[in-house]
């Protein structure tokens, strides 16, 4: 029995360890003070040479991709700690536990870029809307795929413009530096202004249950620690069991079936010897 249990444990562990990056599951990974690790650059990804795009890591031990939406903070591969993972649909109600959750167009702190520069159209002022716009732009990267497995952002002028647009949207007065201006126009898709405009037109199409904001760093209760911050990220979310879950389940069931059959054969052998 001990051997059987050990086999099943190793099977499940291996299945999780070798699973491709996938959207996190809202049932277990969303909430305050989740265990976070930023591990490395996904194979084949260039991050456009500027430290943007996607990064590999884990949430509560499960492999996922972190999408960079913050250019005023930094991180180092191998960083780990507690952070809050908040569904976009819950950002407004939990603004105090979300990085930049209380930033507005006219407040303190405030968003640095408040208008769609080329058209002088006001950009939405809530953190929820800003992160929704960022999520829409992430979905426009060359190489983005819905299930994250194999997602690799290409090193193209268009991808760079998308990343700069995201950084422009989240730039705010709580910190210095970063993309505090928007350049370009609405007709050239290699400028950040073009993608700001596209996000403004399309961000309402984002399902706020499909994305979450990762806010580093917190204590074990989920209280934000502004003296020890790291970049803010978006992660994808799926509310239903995903491929890694089914892989683990199949392997576990196969293991149980093997040992059940083995036990049945041993029982028959013993019965025939005593008959």
Image (cartoon, grey):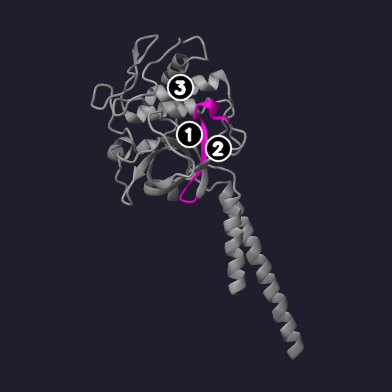
Give the residue at x 45% y 44%. 79
Q: Are marks 2 and 3 in contact (CB under 8 Å)?
A: no
Residue 4 rendering spot, x and y as whole percentages? 61, 70
* C-alpha span from label 1 to label 2: 11 Å
The boundaries of the magenta stretch are: 46-61
- The residue that appears at 63% across and 58% down in the rendered structure is 251
Disc 1 target residue: 67
Q: In this figure, what is the number of numbered marks?
A: 3
- Badge 1: how crowded within 10 Å, few (<14), some, or many (20+)? many
Crowding at dot 2, Cα within 10 Å, few <14 / some 14-19 / many 20+, comes out as some
Q: Position of residue 69 (x, y in %)?
A: 43, 30
Name the residue that disc number 2 marks. 41
* Residue 51 within the magenta-colored segment of the rendering: yes
Give the spatial CA distance, label 2 vs label 3: 19 Å
Q: Quarter of the image containing the C terminus?
A: bottom right
| Residue that label 3 marks | 164
Cα–Cα gap, marks 1 and 3? 13 Å
- Residue 118 falls left or right of residue 51: left
Q: Find residue 53 and name its label.
A: none
Look at the image and tell me in which quarter the N terminus lies. Answer: bottom right
């Amino acid at each position: 029995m001990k051997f059987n249990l050990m086999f099943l444990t190793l099977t499940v562990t291996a299945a999780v360890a070798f699973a491709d990056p996938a959207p996190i599951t809202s049932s277990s990974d969303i909430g305050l003070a989740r265990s976070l690790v930023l591990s490395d650059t996904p194979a084949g990804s260039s991050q456009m040479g500027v430290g943007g795009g996607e990064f590999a890591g884990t949430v509560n031990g499960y492999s996922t991709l972190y999408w960079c939406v913050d250019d005023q903070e930094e991180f180092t591969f191998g960083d780990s700690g507690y952070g809050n993972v908040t569904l976009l649909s819950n950002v407004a109600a939990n603004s105090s536990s979300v990085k930049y959750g209380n930033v507005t167009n006219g407040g303190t702190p405030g968003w640095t870029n408040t208008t769609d520069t080329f058209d002088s159209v006001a950009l939405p002022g809530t953190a929820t809307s800003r992160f929704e716009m960022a999520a829409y732009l992430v979905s426009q990267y060359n190489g983005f795929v819905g299930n994250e497995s194999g997602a690799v952002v290409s090193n193209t002028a268009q991808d760079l413009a998308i990343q700069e647009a995201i950084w422009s949207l989240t730039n705010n007065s709580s910190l210095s530096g970063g993309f505090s201006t928007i350049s370009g126009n609405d007709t050239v898709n290699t400028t950040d202004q073009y993608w700001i405009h596209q996000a403004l037109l399309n961000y309402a199409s984002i399902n706020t249950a499909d994305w979450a904001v990762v806010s580093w760093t917190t204590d074990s209760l989920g209280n934000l620690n502004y003296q020890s911050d790291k970049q803010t990220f978006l992660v994808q979310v799926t509310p239903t069991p995903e491929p890694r879950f089914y892989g683990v389940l199949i392997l576990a069931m196969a293991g149980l079936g093997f040992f059940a059959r083995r036990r049945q054969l041993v029982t028959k052998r013993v019965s025939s010897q005593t008959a």
